[in-house]
C-alpha cells in the first residue's frame, strides 16, 4: 500500500522525472501537448520547498517516490504549487491521498484555506479538486496573490481562458 511521507533531500533529484511522467497525459490534448515537453521544477526548486514550504511524497513498497505535492504558506492560506503522480500510477487515488495530506496539514497548522490554480476543463484538474471541496473563484473574487499567479502562468504560455484559481475554505 502506498505511503505518504515528508520529502527527503535525496528524493529531490527524483521528482522532476515524476513531474515529466505526470505531464504525459497532456499529449492527448493537441493544443496543450506542448506541456508534456515543457520545463519541470528542478531538483533545486524541490529542495527549496523542503526548506521553506511543504513537500510530501507518496512512495511505493520500496520507499521510492511515485508522486509528490509541494506547497507553501502565503498569509493564512496554503498554496498548492504542484501535484504530480507518475503516469502509470495515475487513477489509483494517489493524487487524492497527497491532497488530503496537504489539507490535513493546513488544518493542523490553523490555516484558513488551501488555494491552487488549475485547468478549468480537464477532468483531472478542476473537476478533481471540486470533488475535494474546492470552489472555483470568479475573477472578482481573486486576491492579488492569486491574480498574479494566473497572470504569471499566462505570461509563460498557459491559456488564461482555460485556467482558474480555486479555494478550499477550512473555517
Image (tube, rainbow, N blue to C red):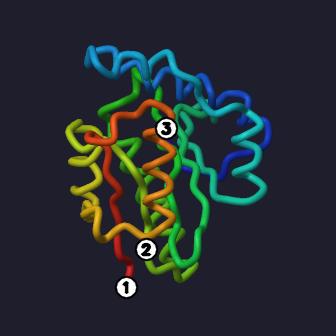
- Callout 3 crowding tier (Cα within 10 Å): few <14, some 14–19, many ≥20: few
Residue drawn at 21 percent across, 48 percent down: 127
Instruction: Select label 3 or label 2 by which is in front.
Output: 3
Q: Secondary structure at mark 1?
A: loop
Q: Which mark is residue 155?
A: 3
Residue 148 image point, x, y percent:
50, 56
Residue 131 position, x and y percent, is 22, 56
In the rendered image, the vertical position of residue 160 relative to residue 16, given as above or below: below
What residue is drawn where x is 52% and y is 66%? 78
How much space separates mark 1 and mark 2, taking CA atoms? Answer: 7 Å
User: For numbered disc 2, what is the local secondary structure?
Assistant: strand
Q: Which mark is residue 171?
A: 1
Quarter of the view holding residue 163 = top left
Looking at the image, is mark 3 or mark 2 earlier in the sequence?
A: 2
**Classed neighbour count for the residue bearing mark 1: other residues with Cα under 10 Å, few (<14), some (14–19), many (≥20):** few
Q: Which mark is residue 113?
A: 2
Q: Cβ–Cβ below 8 Å for labels 1 and 2?
A: yes
Q: Does 100 appear above or below 18? A: below
Q: Nearer the viewer, mark 3 or mark 1?
A: 3
Mark earlier in primary sequence (1, 2): 2
How far apart, in angstroms, are the residues tagged by discs 3 and 2? 26 Å
Could you tell me residue 92's position as x and y percent? 32, 36
Q: Are marks 3 and 2 in contact (CB under 8 Å)?
A: no
Amino acid at each position: 500500500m502506498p505511503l505518504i511521507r515528508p520529502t527527503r533531500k535525496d528524493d529531490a533529484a527524483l521528482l522532476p522525472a515524476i513531474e515529466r511522467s505526470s505531464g504525459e497525459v497532456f499529449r492527448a490534448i493537441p493544443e496543450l501537448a506542448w506541456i508534456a515537453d515543457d520545463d519541470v521544477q528542478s531538483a533545486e526548486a524541490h529542495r527549496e520547498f523542503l526548506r521553506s514550504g511543504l513537500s510530501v511524497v507518496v512512495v511505493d513498497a520500496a520507499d521510492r517516490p511515485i508522486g509528490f505535492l509541494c506547497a507553501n504558506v502565503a498569509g493564512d492560506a496554503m498554496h498548492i504549487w504542484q501535484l504530480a503522480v507518475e503516469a502509470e500510477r495515475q487513477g489509483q487515488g494517489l493524487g487524492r491521498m497527497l491532497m488530503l495530506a496537504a489539507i490535513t496539514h493546513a488544518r493542523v497548522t490553523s490555516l484558513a484555506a488551501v488555494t491552487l490554480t488549475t485547468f478549468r476543463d480537464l477532468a483531472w484538474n478542476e473537476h478533481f479538486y471540486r470533488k475535494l471541496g474546492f470552489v472555483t473563484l470568479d475573477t472578482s473574487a481573486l486576491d492579488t496573490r492569486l491574480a498574479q499567479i494566473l497572470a504569471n502562468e499566462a505570461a509563460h504560455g498557459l491559456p488564461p481562458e482555460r485556467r482558474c484559481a480555486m479555494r478550499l475554505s477550512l473555517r
